[in-house]
Amino acid sequence: MYSSPFIYKKGKEMTQNTAITQEEWTPKTNPWLIIMPVMLATFMYALDETVANVALPHIAGSYSVSNQESIWVLTSYLMASSIVIPMIDYFCHLMGRKAFFMFGVFVFTIASFLCGVSNSIGMIVIARALQGVGGGCLMPMAQAITMESFKGEARNKAMAVFGLVVVVAPILGPVLGGWITENWSWPYIFFINLPVGFLCIFLAKLFLEDPPYAKKQKNVQLNKLGFLWLCVWLVPLQIVFDKGNDADWFNAPWICWLTAIAVTGAVLFFIWQVWGKHPLIKLDVLKDKNFLCGTAMLILLNGVLLASLAILPQLLQNMLGYDAFTSGVAIMPRGLGAFLALAIFGGLGGRLTYKTYGIIGLFCMGLGGWILSELNLEISMMNIVLPNFIFGIGLVFSMMPITTLSCITLRNDQMTNASGFQNLLKTIGGAIGTSLVATMISRFSQLHQNGLVKNMTEANPQFYERLTTYAASFIHQAGDMINSTYMAGKFLYNQLIQQSTLCAYMTTFKVFSIACFVLIPLMFLLQGEKQSAK
């Protein structure tokens, strides 16, 4: 008999009656009222994954740090979320899920205020980590509450709303962040969470209720060693991915040592979840093929989503000269595409299977990424709008069905544990993707630069013609042909750097596109909704 992740009673096992109660429980309140605070909390958390993206240059300027250092504002949030997610079961046992949900929103809201009043890069990184601690628990609980509160076709509709919030909020983040940064100042991208957070706490107090298996329990014990190995795994791992490129990766001994520590921590963490008492997460959900395959797909998709949202504003601002708000507007069609996809999803209803939706979605994401990989510096905004619109359609059509199918074969009493585990792995995937994409841009730029520089020789007629043309135009500034030729050569080299950087962005988007296409065959491994059974 599978024991609920919410019940710890020494020397006792869950009875058959309790299991039936868990399966048949229905909330007393209208489920659509229950998910109001749930969706607000989900929106806040997902929005803050990307709202700071377009403001990073402004944050870096405020604290006089490099863009590479400012990326910790993003990754500290994601990694802190990863660490707290496996602790959800423990705190739900200790406090009750409703109380813990409200506590998480409160911590998130206070941390948002601290982010806005931060006076150093260290303080904002710590405040963002605290924000991640508060927010990391919200998404898994929101997913579990939504799945448990609805049944049948109503569950599909509720999960459609949940999926829309999860997909659209990170897309709207750069738009909202850019507008606030340009019209007010970047601290207000965090201050806007204050009224929303307190409203969410108020609504949660009114409408949320704990099912029998999610109430406060006695004799709750914390898996201290499991939590220790989790930190030993994730903290060094994030440092490696954030600082690895600057340190030339494994050519630096300290990177090798941190990697070894992270791998050891990961192995010990998973061993302890199997053999230790009171595990933070129950790994038996991995026996479910839908959950295993769907979660693996979601890890990669979340990495692609957050990584693309991290570099696209940089491309628009650094290469095309857009300001923060304009770059956000250029990305906004992702949200419009997501809304259109939701309308289509609702209109067609069950005429198409979730597998079909997923295949269409992955193809659209791959197509959008491929179009972005064909850009150049002479493009108009429409060349950015169209692929982002297609990408947005693909996000809804892929992530919503995959999320639903990954949990559709699980029992209700497995939902919170499974969604927590899934969100842990998804968040790690997003954090790693956000960190690695900076390395991809740097290395691809070096690769393209090495290829292009071979053409910068006087033996190349085109290069020589352009060099002499520019040298003639600089003669009045330089005063003589030697200096004007030097200026022309430097000007052409700067153009080469610009072109190689652009090619690096294009290659990175092509990698994202291929990753989405590769996932399409995996959709056939997921059990369809008609064959699932509780």
Image (tube, helix red, strand yellow):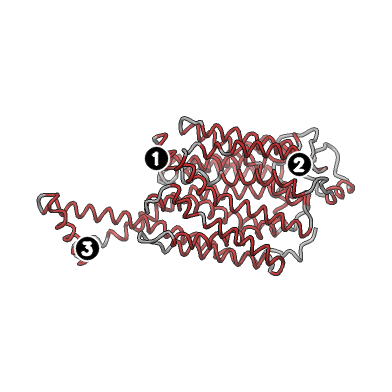
Q: Is disc 2 surrounded by few (<14), some (14 to 19) or many (20+) residues within 10 Å? A: many
* Location of residue 196 in the rendering, given as x and y in whole percent from the top left corner: 62, 39
Could you tell me which quadrant the C terminus lies in?
Answer: bottom right
Q: Mark 1 sits on what residue?
A: 66
As shown in the figure, which amino acid type bears the numbered disc 1? Ser
**Callout 1–callout 2 Cβ contact below 8 Å:** no
- Tell me which corner region of the image, top left, top right, bottom left or bottom right, holds residue 446: bottom left
Query: Is tag 1's residue or tag 2's residue first in the polypeptide sequence?
Result: 1
The residue depicted at 61 percent of the width and 66 percent of the height is 359
Q: Nearer the viewer, residue 479 or 190?
A: 190
Q: Nearer the viewer, residue 58 or 249?
A: 58
Q: Mark 3 sits on what residue?
A: 463
Q: CA distance from mark 2 to mark 3?
A: 69 Å
As shown in the figure, which amino acid type bears the numbered disc 2? Leu
Q: Is disc 3 surrounded by few (<14), some (14 to 19) or many (20+) residues within 10 Å? A: some
Q: Nearer the viewer, residue 188 or 139?
A: 188
Q: Nearer the viewer, mark 1 or mark 2?
A: 2
Q: Mark 2 sits on what residue?
A: 208
Query: Is tag 2's residue or tag 3's residue first in the polypeptide sequence?
Result: 2
Q: Is residue 503 visible?
A: yes
* Location of residue 180 in the rendering, given as x and y in whole percent from the top left corner: 49, 42
Say which element carries label 1.
loop
The residue lying furthest to the front in this view is 183
Say which element carries label 3.
helix
Say which element carries label 2.
loop
